[in-house]
Each structure stands twice: as C-alpha cells, then as structure tokens.
Image (tube, rainbow, N blue to C red):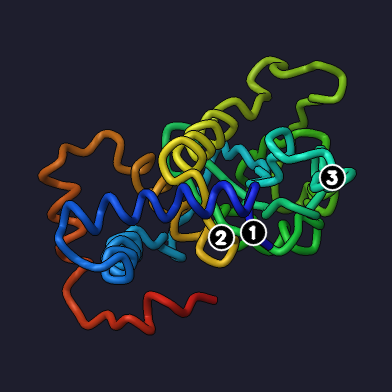
Amino acid sequence: MVLGNVSYLFAQERHFLASVSRDLGVTQKTAWNILHKVRSLFAQDDSVVLEQEVECDEAYIGGREKNKHESKKTEKTQGRSLKTKTPVFGMIQRGGKLVAIKTQDTMGNTLSPIIRQFVKPNSRIFTDEYIGYNSLHESEYSHSVVHHGANEFVDGDSYTNTIEGFWGQLKRSIFGIYHFVSAKYLQRYVDESVFRYNTRKWDEVDRFRHMFERSIGKFTYEDVKNVA
C-alpha cells in the first residue's frame, strides 16, 4: 500500500532527497540511507508504561483523493477504510508519554493486546465510541467514552483531544515536509514525530546527547532497507 497520489508524491520525495544530496554532496541513495539511519535513532521503547489517565485513538494516513483525476480515484475511502490508508494506533498518558504504532488493521483483537502491553492495569482509558474498544474489560481498565458521532467532543474530563492534537502534528509533518512516505517505512516517520513529542520539554543539548548515545554501534544499509 502506498500513501497518497503516487505519481505526484513520489516526485516530491525525489525532490526532497535531491535537496539533501545536493547540500551534503552525496548521491540520492546515500542521502536516503543517511536520513533513515537518523530516523532509526528515534525508535520507540517497548518497555514504556502508561498509567493513570490514558487517551487512545487511531489515525489513518494516506488516501488523499481530491488531487487525483476522477478516473483514478478509489471509491469508498472515507473514514476508517483501509483501501488507500495505513492505520496508526496511539496511546498518550495525559501529562506524560506517547506511544504510536503502525498496525495492519484496527480490529479489537489487534488494539486490545497493544493496550495491555503498554497501559498499566486499573488505569482510566478514554476513547471514542469505536467498536474496536468494546473488548476492553472493566476488570482491567476504567473505560470512558466520548461520542464523536453525536457531536460530543468533551464530557467533563472525558475527551481524546490530546491524542488528536498529536495526529494533527504527525499529518502536517508527513504531508507538509516529506509529502510522501510508503507504508513500509511509515513507522520510522511516526517514531520521529513521537520522539519530538516525548522530548518537547528537552533542550537541544539533551536531545543531541540522547541520539548520540543511541547512534553508537554498527548499522548497515541492509538494516536501513529492511523493516518488519
């Protein structure tokens, strides 16, 4: 699956790589390799624990149909359709860290294990009314729902505005800066945005030190090229 209008956006990606390769004085293949080596330093930590108040939500990246010719548009791509979109599932502890993961789908049997991996039992979870969250058990979590379909976006302290704000940042980064990313490498761009969010209160010295410590070790071209 490729995100967005392939013919136009692939040209945009090539333009971005051409700019980097020109500035660094290297080939475009080398520029691509360097950029993904850097992005590999943003990889998320699987040991993160979210607790207390946690917002969960899904985003669907890609599927921009409005700039396509009518003959090339894909039908029924609105909402949660995965025909031309790739799902990303996010969880954010209010006032704390964020985790976001590319998934194959947003079915309950996909989302629930991810929630159980990262969210501490007995935490309070906030979601919209999507049926994918119906498999959450009250014995594990306190589950509060905000009904977006009924134009309800805040009900007391029940809302998902925090995680939705991050989705806005992610989409602006992908479509505003990179213009095009393939589903295969989408997780690396998600990791980059998550890293920026989770370190938003750090100064640049701490960010650089953290990335420098992660960069120690051998990382080959095959490591860059091959992703799960």
Q: Residue 22 versus residue 190: which sits nearer the camera? A: 22
Q: Badge 3 is on which residue?
A: 71
Quadrant (top left/top right/bottom left/bottom right) for the C terminus: bottom right
Q: Nearer the viewer, residue 29 or 77?
A: 29
**Which quadrant is home to the N terminus?**
bottom right
Using the image, determine if residue 129 lies above or below residue 198. Answer: above
**Disc 2 on helix, strand or loop?**
loop
Q: Residue at x 60, y 61 (%)?
A: 183
Q: Residue at x 63, y 20 (%)?
A: 157
Q: Are marks 2 and 1 in contact (CB under 8 Å)?
A: yes
Looking at numbered disc 2 in the image, what kind of residue is underneath it? Ser
Q: As drawn, is 90 to the left or to the right of 206?
A: right
Front residue of 7 and 78: 7
Q: What amino acid type is highlighted by mark number 3? A: Ser
How far apart are the two marked residues, 1 and 3, measured between alpha carbons? 18 Å
- Spatial CA distance of label 2 from label 1 is 5 Å
Q: Which residue is mark 1?
A: 2
Which residue is tagged 2? Answer: 182
Q: Amino acid at mark 1?
A: Val
Measured as percent of width and height from the top left, residue 210 is found at: 19, 56
Q: Is 185 placed above or below 221 here?
A: above
**For the residue labelled by badge 1, is the local secondary structure a helix, a strand or a loop?**
loop
State the SS at label 3. helix
**Residue at the location (89% across, 43% down)?**
76
Q: Tell which circle, 2 or 1, labels the residue nearer the N-terminal end.
A: 1
